[in-house]
Amino acid sequence: MNMKQKGFTIVELATVIAVIAILATISAVVYSGVQERGRYSKAQTDMKHLNDAITIYRSKTSAYPGTATAGCQDILATTTTYAAPLNVIVPNYLDKTVAPPNTTGSVYKYCWTANGANYKILRFIPSANGGLPTVEKTNNPYLNTTGAYAGTASVRLSWGYWSDGGQSI
C-alpha cells in the first residue's frame, strides 16, 4: 500500500522560519526609527509652543519671563506646573505645561538673563554617545554644539530657541 505523507519537509519549514525572522528584524529596526522620530516630533512641537508663549508674553510685557537675577530651571518629564519665572505663561499664554518625552534623563531647560532681557530654551537628551539621536542632529536648524548640561563634564548636543542675545546664555 502506497500512502502519501502529508506535511512539510524540514527544508520548507526552515525556509519559512528564516523569512519570518528576516521580516521581524526589519520590522524592529523600522519601529525603533519611528519611535525616535515620534519623540523628536513631540519635542519640536512642545518647544515651538513654549517659544511662542514666551514670545507672546514678551510682546505684552516688554520682557521675557525672568527674575532680577539670571538663572536656569529644568523642565523635567514629570513637570505638571512651572516654577517661577515660567509660571506666568500657564494658562494665560499656554494651555498646559509642556515637558520632554518621558525618556530617562530628558530635560528641557529654560535660562534667562537678569530682568528678562534675553532667554534660551534647550532640549537635552542623554544617549550612549553623549549627544542627541541622529534624527535630532540632522533635522534641526537650531543645533547648539557647545555647553554641558547640569554641570556635567561632557559636552552634549542640544537644540532649542533663544532670543537675539540669548545664544550666549
Image: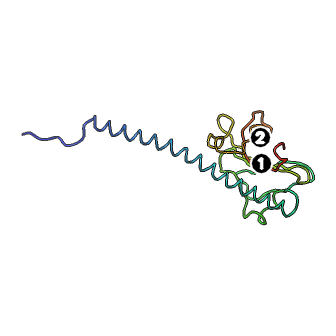
Q: Residue at point 64% right, 53% down?
A: 42
Q: Secondary structure at mark 1?
A: strand
Compared with 130, 76 (above or below) is: below
Contact between marks 2 and 1 (CB within 8 A): the answer is yes
Q: Which residue is the site of mark 2?
A: 149
Q: Is residue 2 left or right of residue 31?
A: left
Circle 2 residues within 10 Å: few <14, some 14–19, many ≥20: some
Q: Amino acid at mark 1?
A: Lys
Q: Which residue is the site of mark 1?
A: 109
Q: CA distance from mark 2 to mark 1?
A: 9 Å
Is residue 73 at least partly visible in the picture?
Answer: no
Residue 70 percent coordinates (x, y): 89, 48
The figure's colour scheme reads rainbow
In the picture, the disc for residue 165 is none
Say which of 87 and 113 sits in front: 113
Residue 105 percent coordinates (x, y): 70, 44
Compared with 6, 96 (above or below) is: below
Q: Amino acid at mark 2?
A: Tyr
Q: Secondary structure at mark 2?
A: loop
